[in-house]
Amino acid sequence: MEEKVVHAVQDFYPEDFAWCYGCGRMNKEGHQFRTGWQGEQTLTIYTPKEEHTAIPGFVYGGLIASLIDCHGTGSAALALHRKNGHEVGDGVEPPRFVTASLKVDFVKPTPHGVPLRAVGIVTEIHPKKWKVDAEVFANEKIVAKGEVVAVVMPSSFAKGGE
Amino acid sequence: MEEKVVHAVQDFYPEDFAWCYGCGRMNKEGHQFRTGWQGEQTLTIYTPKEEHTAIPGFVYGGLIASLIDCHGTGSAALALHRKNGHEVGDGVEPPRFVTASLKVDFVKPTPHGVPLRAVGIVTEIHPKKWKVDAEVFANEKIVAKGEVVAVVMPSSFAKGGE
């Protein structure tokens, strides 16, 4: 049976904030990454589409970077939500994060055609700024490592970014 | 008149290596980023599609990371090709790089609907390993900074990645 994230934070973002190409459930053209808890770690599972190649047989690095990016913001949202006394699906909207920085080390070529598992460890570095250390696995082998610094979405983002 | 990269290195990659979701000219589902020289710097121009949103009005960070990724490998290919005494389009196939690491700092929210310009400075750190410092502009304002370390595509990549 295929592993699946059951309680994903992205399922509960406010609708206006659910249009992310990476993880927005409203964006039907996007990847619709979904991130949930797995014990004390966070987990996002995604099987790349046929076109997501670097060269035939291997996954495009930018897709892996995108996976780590949204895994990072989703993981931070899960962690702050829990810190605030809430769990996904309890009726309270989770916070929404944006990415301040993203770092990816590509450990080895990533085989195409199998699910990728991004696993994260979340650390608070400031009440509005969280760090997520991520590892991405294919066939249970690590293929990439990432670090995301995510910040609570600033009000300027919703108002026009200036 | 819209600015355009005329001599792009990706136009001359061997056909087998032109399936990258980011920059492969054979991958019709992909972004088809194109990178060329602009003086001593490198340039990639891309206008995100409607679906490439973070939230409505702003560009998805993973798309910007993808742009920097392929801009990096393309820039490294241009630089090594020139070091080898060649220019894009002179009949000699350019080298093909893969990304070892990618770092992106998101400087400000990126407005959607305008062309993004990635500008790169390429530095050789080893004959097979090149660093590309990139800046991404929208409406002539910097929106992201990136660093890519790219390495000449190892033979293992073509053989199965193990």
Image: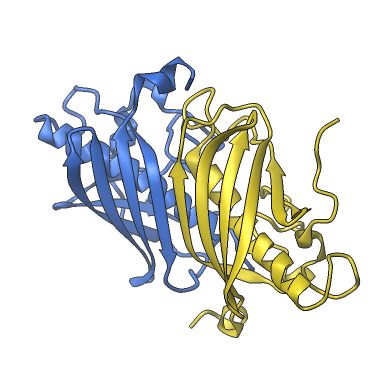
Chain colours: A yellow, B blue
Q: Quadrant of residue B114?
A: bottom left
Furthest toward the left, the residue is: B85
Q: Work out whether B4 lies above or below A161.
A: above
Q: Position of residue A7 (x, y in %)?
A: 84, 56
Q: Quadrant of residue A8?
A: bottom right
- Give whichever of A114, A123 is nearer the camera: A123
**Residue drawn where x is 27% and y is 50% of the image:** B132
Q: Work out whether A124 lies above or below A22.
A: below
Q: Quadrant of residue A47?
A: top right
Work out whether residue B81 can be spotted. Answer: yes
**Residue drawn where x is 51% and y is 64% of the image:** B113
Query: Seen in the image, is A51 located left or right of residue A17?
Result: left
- Give whichever of A78, B1 is nearer the camera: A78
Work out whether residue A32 can be spotted. Answer: no
**Residue drawn where x is 25% and y is 38% of the image:** B129
Query: Seen in the image, is B89 located left or right of residue B114?
Result: left
**Residue drawn where x is 56% and y is 27% of the image:** A111
Q: Position of residue B120 (x, y in %)?
A: 26, 54
Q: Quadrant of the N terminus of chain B?
A: bottom left
Query: Seen in the image, is A152 located left or right of residue A146?
Result: right
Furthest toward the top, the residue is: B159
